[in-house]
Amino acid sequence: MVHDSTASETTLASLDYPAILDLLEARCRSPYGRERARGLRPSSDSREVLDRQMSTREWVRQRQRHGNLALSLATDVRPLLERMTVEGSHLGGIELYLVVDQLKAALTVREMLLASEERSIEEIGRRFPDLRNLIRFLDGKISAAGRLGDRCSSDLVKIRRWIASV
């Protein structure tokens, strides 16, 4: 989103704009939403203002019809994913569980967006990658405590049974 520099930070402060952002940020249910809220700036570009107003109306209708998006994420997993760009890196069990949990939440949101009657919201849903196969592969194999579940592999089941019998 392109912003012009119509309003200086001093002007925004005198209008209590930071307090408005604080209120908006407090209503966000994820670190990603809080970051986006904190970055909002007014615009004097009439086209951008009209686009934002239209988008707001669409999201209000979406929320009235379907309620809030099923998205409440406490952890920002971007640093974990960034760490994975280094060859030879790995995630611990709890970290992998957090990533899978967010993938599942994203899939739920994707499905809600794709079912929207609002075309622009449906389009946003199409931009989400379809990760159902990855989620099916990983889901339930790692507990919230970061431990591998017995369903990870048949070999793991055999090893755990053998250990229990010894």
Image (spheres, grey):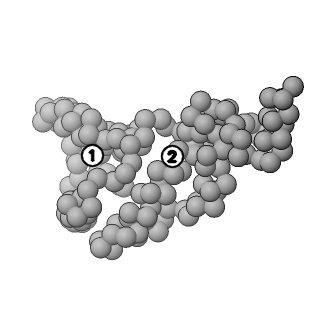
Provide the secondary structure element on which disc 2 rests: helix
Q: Which residue is mark 1?
A: 41
Q: Position of residue 69 (x, y in %)?
A: 34, 54
**Type of amino acid at the residue the image marks with label 2:** Gln
Q: Position of residue 79 (x, y in %)?
A: 57, 36
Residue drawn where x is 84% and y is 29% of the image: 165
Is residue 93 shown left or right of residue 73?
right
Residue drawn where x is 29% and y is 71% of the image: 118
Reply above or below: 150 against 116: above
Reply above or below: 161 against 110: above
Q: Residue furthest front?
A: 165
Q: Residue furthest top?
A: 166
- Location of the C terminus (image quadrant): top right
Of tags 2 and 1, which is closer to the observer? 2
**Quick one: label 2 or label 1, which is nearer the N terminus?**
1
Reply above or below: 67 against 146: below
Residue closest to the eye, 97 or 57: 97
Residue drawn where x is 42% and y is 40% of the image: 73
Q: Position of residue 98 (x, y in %)?
A: 55, 39
Residue closest to the eye, 123 or 47: 123
**Type of amino acid at the residue the image marks with label 1:** Arg
Q: Is any atom of residue 79 visible in this view?
A: no
Q: Position of residue 13 (x, y in %)?
A: 18, 31
Mark 1 crowd level (few <14, some 14–19, many ≥20, 10 Å Cα)? some
Residue closest to the eye, 130 or 83: 130
Provide the secondary structure element on which disc 1 rests: loop
Gap in angstroms between the C-alphas marked 2 and 1:
28 Å
Mark 2 crowd level (few <14, some 14–19, many ≥20, 10 Å Cα)? some
Q: Which residue is mark 2?
A: 102
